[in-house]
Amino acid sequence: MTQPSGVSPIAPYGTRQAAHRAKSASFREAPGPAAGQPECPRRSPVAQPPGLRAVSQAMFQLSTHTPRGVLLTVAALAAYAAPTTAYAQGLPLPPAPVRGDEVGDHLTVTVSHAGRADGTYRLRCHPGGGSHPDPGGACGTLDRRTIWGRDPFSPVAPDGLCTMQYGGPATAYVTGTWAGRPVNATYDRSDGCQIARWNDLVPLLPDLRSPRS
């Protein structure tokens, strides 16, 4: 049978309608991978953070316009937002504010069993100030005794030779910061070495020497 000119062939589908349907179906079918070619891996869904799931659930409760939904939303946002933000940014928390009397060189001196000199005094240096009775003299003494490699508040050497001299029951306790280093020192007048150590810090510590000494 001769196919008329100008008419599209219909074999091997039988009719033009069948051919059209068959070709449309062939375009819709996606060809599979060729033999020996690996299939493209599928992406696994990204896991939703637990905190974000809690926020989503709370927002769903809010959509019901109930008081319970509102409370859940506020609680979820408060529990999730701040920690997640801090973790994502990786920034340290801001330091606590420093009081004005704790900046620079500052000491607290507590004197006991020294009669009229008993009390707790605060000293600031550079510039000088505080409740200490002689801030200028105390700061000057500390400045003169502050030498590189030497601690002006160092204790008596354990192997030192000290006279069996007793200077009274007075004690002193000094804490704070000096030259950028923490200070935590205890003083007494139990022998000659301890008396000399005390006298080296006068007037930071009260002068308990007799008028003839």
Image (spheres, grey):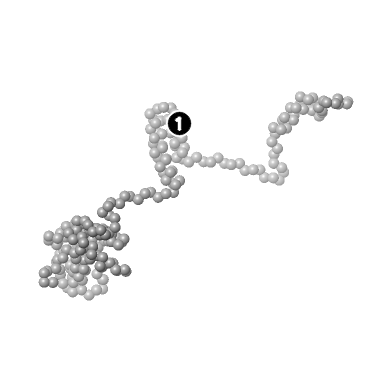
Residue at (38, 49) in percent of width and height: 93
- 87 up-or-down from 190: above or below: above
Residue matched to label 1? 60
User: Residue 120: x percent and y percent?
Assistant: 19, 57
- 57 up-or-down from 36: above or below: above
Quarter of the view holding residue 30: top right
User: Residue 164: x percent and y percent?
Assistant: 17, 73
The answer to whether residue 124 shows anywhere in this view is: yes
Relative depth, front residue between 139 and 182: 139
Residue at (42, 40) in percent of width and height: 81
Quarter of the view holding residue 31: top right
Quarter placement of the C terminus:
bottom left
Q: Of the residues shown, which amino acid type is indicated by label 1?
A: Phe
User: Residue 196: x percent and y percent?
Assistant: 20, 70
Residue at (85, 26) in percent of width and height: 5
* Numbered disc total: 1
How crowded is the residue under tag 1: few (<14 C-alpha within 10 Å), some, or many (20+)?
Answer: some
Furthest residue to the front? 127
Q: Secondary structure at mark 1?
A: helix
User: Residue 67: x percent and y percent?
Assistant: 38, 29
Furthest residue to the right? 1
The answer to whether residue 107 shows anywhere in this view is: no
- 23 up-or-down from 115: above or below: above
Quarter of the view holding residue 79: top left
Quarter placement of the N terminus:
top right
The reply, left or right, for residue 42 in relation to residue 163 is right
Residue at (44, 36) in percent of width and height: 55
